[in-house]
Image (cartoon, helix red, strand yellow):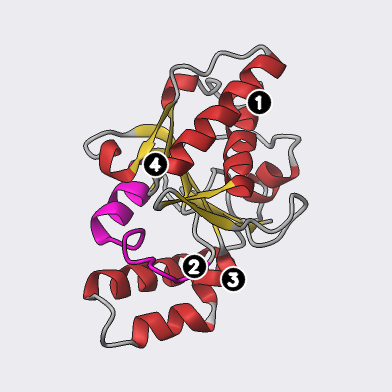
Amino acid sequence: YNEKSRMLPIDTDPHWTRVVARPGFSVVMPVVVIDSSSGTQGRGEAHEVHKGYENTVEAQLVVDVVRRLVESSRILNSVAPSSIGICTPYKRQVTLIKYKLQQMMKQKGFKYNSITVSTADAFQGSERDYMIVSTVRTSTKSIDFALSQKRLNVMLTRGRVLTVVISNKAMFEGKDMQSLINNGKTSSDARQGGEVFRGLFEWATTNGVVFK
């Protein structure tokens, strides 16, 4: 809970309603999590492409969140596209998200050119009111890159009003991730990153801000 978070009325969308109408809260939570491992769009699978990774389901979820933010006329001071940032560890995911944003722009007639979509490395030093994070991965194979403390710090601390984390809850809470954390051969950076995400999911589940 953050007293400086922007006040929001109850929106008609059920995701927003569950966040802002939860008993005891009158403001949006500073962080919410969308679980890409289950839901109406199907399970998100990360695919390795040219030494990078992309996740089609997570990319579509990112676009859906952007559309809801910009379309919602009931949000105080409505959300300008320039106040939205999208961050992910992988260049392939950046390319995919930009492509899907362009598709939506054509279909809806919206202009989202001012939205920043970039990797965590490129986003350093920048902030936005609304940050959307796509972690992409669905397995722990060669995941050290994505769990870098520097990249996690950028992805999780650049949203001034709200951060939406789109991630595979099953993977981060699974036995493989626990084994990676416990494995002495895993870099300390990756182990700490895994613990950060497991803690994030635990907190989000406890506070009722994990959505599918």
Labelled pair 4, 1 in contact (Cβ < 8 Å): no
Q: Are marks 3 and 2 in contact (CB under 8 Å)?
A: no
Residue 109 visible in rendering: yes
**Among the two numbered marks 3 and 2 on one chain, the one whose residue lies closer to the N terminus:** 3
Where residue 46 sits: x, y (%)? 55, 56
Q: Residue at x 39, y 41 (%)?
A: 91
Closest to the observer, 142 or 192: 142
Residue pointed to by mark 2: 203
Query: What number is the disc on residue 170?
Result: 3
Which amino acid type corresponds to the residue marked 2 in the rendered image?
Trp
**Mark identifier at residue 95:** none
Q: Nearer the viewer, residue 47 or 117?
A: 47
Which residue range is magenta in the image?
Answer: 139-159
Residue at the far front: name it: 50
Inspect the image, locate mark 1, and give the three-letter code of the amino acid beneath it: Ser
- In the image, is 162 to the left or to the right of 11? left
The image shows residue 178, relative to residue 67, as above or below, that is below
Measured from the top left, where is residue 71 in percent x and y? 65, 23
**Residue at the spot of label 1:** 72
Determine which residue is flagged by label 4. 91
Mark 4 or mark 1, earlier in chain: 1
| Spatial CA span between label 3 and label 4 | 23 Å
The image quarter containing residue 140 is bottom left
Q: Earlier in the sequence, mark 1 or mark 2?
A: 1
For the point 54% across and 78% down, the residue is 174
